Image: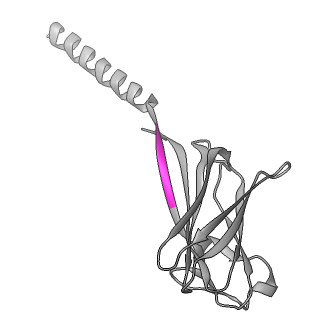
Amino acid sequence: MHAITRFTLFALAAICATALSQAAIAAVVQQSQIMLSADNCQAALPAFDGNIRKRPLAMQNDGTTPAFVTCGFKGLGIDPHSAGNDLIGVALTTQGSQSVSVTCTLVNGFSEPVYLTQTRTVHPGVANLLFWTGNGLDLAAMSCSLPPQTGILYTMRNYEETIED
């Protein structure tokens, strides 16, 4: 009986040690998030509201002049498990018959913001991707000048997240 009790205590101690060590194991996982533009983008000024149409599949400039749209991205915030964004992007489309140029500026940071501007040729009938990469894209928003009949399909971000068991 004494040997069985010792064996039971040893087994119980091993199970507890395994459970405790597994609780301390954490994994860093690369996550991706795609957000429809109707969810996280808006016309940059009230003057553009009349031209910008929020459709389920795109935020579209239905006007005859360029209009600015601003999109925000989730960042580091207060989540202790997130390492912040390392890729931020946008999918652009045009309903016109000609290719057009779209210029977007990513603004990263608050007290000392960094402005990163890119121009992409957007071809009709396909999603045209424009993106920024790098560590520290934690407080980011983007503004795009959309020519007539051009829109934002969705925005995207990649980030690392610590997953604990």
Q: Residue at x 55, y 76 (%)?
A: 93
> Residue extending furthest top?
2
Seen in the image, is 56 located left or right of residue 117?
A: left
Residue shown at 70% from the left, 68% from the top:
103
Q: Position of residue 153 (x, y in %)?
A: 54, 74
Position of 156 relative to 38 (above/below) = above
Q: What kind of secondary structure does the magenta stretch mostly adopt?
A: strand
Residue placed most toward the observer, 27 or 16: 27
Q: Residue furthest front?
A: 98
Q: From the viewer's perspective, is residue 1 above or below residue 74?
A: above
Quadrant position of residue 130: bottom right
In the picture, the quarter occupied by the N terminus is top left
The correct choice, above or below, for 79 with respect to 60 in the image is above
Q: Is residue 73 magenta?
A: no
Q: Position of residue 33 (x, y in %)?
A: 51, 59
**Between 121 and 23, the one nearer to me in the picture:** 121
| Nearer-the-camera pick, 89 or 140 | 89
Which residue is more in the foreground, 40 or 20? 40
Relative side of 117 to 149, left or right: right
- Of the 4 image quadrants, the one containing the C terminus is top left
Left or right of 1 on screen, residue 132: right
Q: Position of residue 35 (x, y in %)?
A: 54, 67
Left or right of residue 75: residue 26: left
Which residues are the magenta region?
28-33
Q: How far across and how far down the image is residue 128, in percent?
A: 53, 68
Please name the colour scheme applied to the rendered image. one colour
